[in-house]
Amino acid sequence: MDNQMNLKHDDPSTGRLKSDQLPQALLLSRQMGWPYRLEDWQFAHALGEGFSLELGEQLIGTAMGWNYGDDFASVGMIIVDNDFQGHGYGARLVDLLLAASGSRSILLNSTREGFALYQRRGFVQIGQTHQHQAVPLPPSGEPLDPRVQEAKPADLTFITRLDQEGVGMPRKALIDSLAQHGQLTVIRDRDAVKGYAASRPFGKGYVIGPVVAENLDDACALIEHAIRQVSGKFVRVDTASDSGLSDWLTARGLRHVGTEAFMVRGLAPRIAGPYKKFALCSQSLC
């Protein structure tokens, strides 16, 4: 305790979050009650740019950002050690992320605790994100939609294009990583890909998302297929409150356990086509 008290009087340094610091970052996320695994940190870190807040050898803060082309970015995994909160360190980390993002519009999902800070930095709320999770109820006797199939390597180009149409941002690196670390399924109408879902190990079990489809029925068909692929396992799905998906997820046994404010600094992505994002990749990666 004495050592900690002395550290509090020092000025922490900032730098890039390095891969060998991720075990310490994992401990910080556990302080927050987040069920991340080391592999979840590694997945996010490999795709983005992280910042650290350090006192000597001790990591006391993290922040991550992910660029999507020249116009958009998302930020998240912003944590300050419980013993060092109340000193403006969170704001310091956020400012590093804003500077690194340049002129890009920035998306984030905010907890209630961080909302005022983000407002002061120019973020405005444009929606809400519902977090659903549980071990799903056993499936009904209805057969799976035969249009939902495991994605083929040749589908990756079409999935990437469909994702950009449904999300409004280019996310090729994210889609490539999801294909490597998880499972991609598609709705196939003859030779055309009309929707997709990703499922991967995460936290206590699996996360299903992103899910991009033309309509709610197709989104539910994709998620149902993913649920049955991990039968009996813990599943998490994050969805926009206006997606229409929350009621179906609740009926499927995935409880609504939290709501975060979806915010943007700058212009929100524009969705021009028929496709829509029904589930997020994660609240940080959006």
Image (cartoon, rainbow, N blue to C red):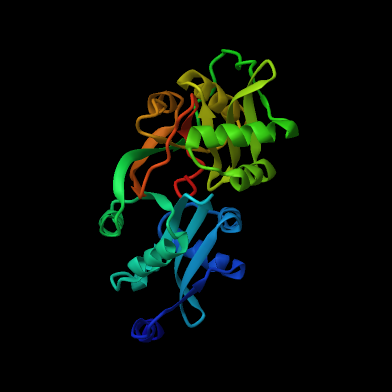
Would residue 178 be seen by someone viewing this image from the given angle? Answer: yes
The one nearer the camera, 72 or 114, is 72
| Total count of labels | 0
Instruction: Quadrant for the N terminus, please.
Output: bottom left
Q: Is residue 181 left or right of residue 269?
A: right
Q: Is 229 situated above or below 114?
A: above
Q: Is 15 situated above or below 37?
A: below
Identity of the residue drawn at 40% across and 29% down? 243
Residue 48 in percent (x, y) is at 55, 57
Q: Quadrant of residue 180?
A: top right
Residue 256 in percent (x, y) is at 37, 35
Residue 39 in percent (x, y) is at 61, 54
Identity of the residue drawn at 54% across and 27% down? 223
Specify the farthest residue to the top: 142
The one nearer the camera, 234 or 261, is 261
The one nearer the camera, 107 or 266, is 266
Identity of the residue drawn at 44% across and 60% down? 102
Would residue 135 be seen by someone viewing this image from the given angle? Answer: no
Residue 269 in percent (x, y) is at 42, 40
